[in-house]
Image: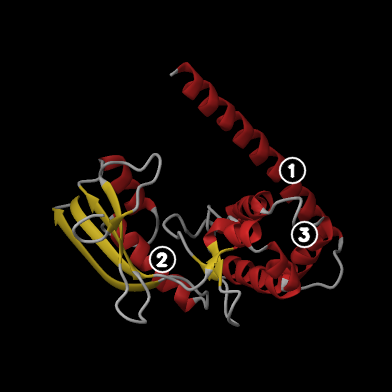
Amino acid sequence: MHAEGEVLAKPGLADWRERLRLPAAGDAPALYLKRYVRPPRTAAAAARRSGWDARSLAGVEWNVLQALTRAGIATIEPIAMGEALDRTRERFSAILTAAVPGDSLERLLMDRPADVTARRRELIAATAALAARLHGAGLVHRDFYLSHLFVDLDRPGTVYLIDVQRVFRPRRWRMARWIVKDLAALNYSAPPGLVRRGDRVQWLQAYLGVSKLDAPGRRLGRRVAAKTRRIARHDAARQRRLRSGSNAG
């Protein structure tokens, strides 16, 4: 426990980044604080290239959250943001946000599969609508996994999109490629034993707003399936490298 809250460690998290969970007061949601201290020039340059007209890493996330809200996408509530710069070099930035209700669909599928199955049609419609709204606004997530979609199964509610630091607006002629990557990431993260093929077809129909897939819809489905297989191969190779590295140690 940090003096200011619980430090949320994450494998591979750079030492210039820090995440804290601040305890809730009463019935209020917990708060999350992200801090960036003298990020490397490469990270700062990527922030400036992100297209969000931000001067810092925290500023990027702040502007992304504003854009998502304007697009009608339920997401993390931004509370405050601060930044300090030496001319164009970021010395420090931080963003404070409120926790969204519920839990990730990834965890719920593992811990409460029967409850998820009971609300399968509702969740298919809600997640497909979120994806369609995101892409319809000209935005892509780039980490569009079930772990980043939160729902509260105990109360009627909304699907919330989290982990939005990498959201960006591609050039129009590249949009289709990025859409396929988003949809493939979501497809890959849906466990085959719990999410059936029929569910995936129904999801794609809901995303496209059709009752039956036409030729362009089937073509999109094939592209998503092919990209999903490439993600699976890449992930398997990464896991093998990690295992061989740990065995060598």
User: How many numbered circles does the render carry?
Assistant: 3
Secondary structure beneath disc 2? helix
Which residue is under mark 1?
Answer: 226
Which residue is under mark 3?
Answer: 200
Secondary structure beneath disc 1? helix
Secondary structure beneath disc 3? helix
- Mark 1, Cα crowd under 10 Å, few <14 / some 14-19 / many 20+, is some
3 vs 1, front mark = 3
Q: Amino acid at mark 3?
A: Arg
Seen as rendered, the residue at the extreme top is 248
Whether residue 33 appears in this view of the structure is yes
Which residue is under mark 2?
Answer: 64
Q: Residue at x 80, y 66 (%)?
A: 202
Q: Which quadrant of the structure image shows residue 52?
A: bottom left
Q: Amino acid at mark 2?
A: Val
Whether residue 138 appears in this view of the structure is no
Say which label, 2 or 3, has the lower sequence index.
2
Q: What percent of the width, then of the height, locates residue 198?
A: 84, 60
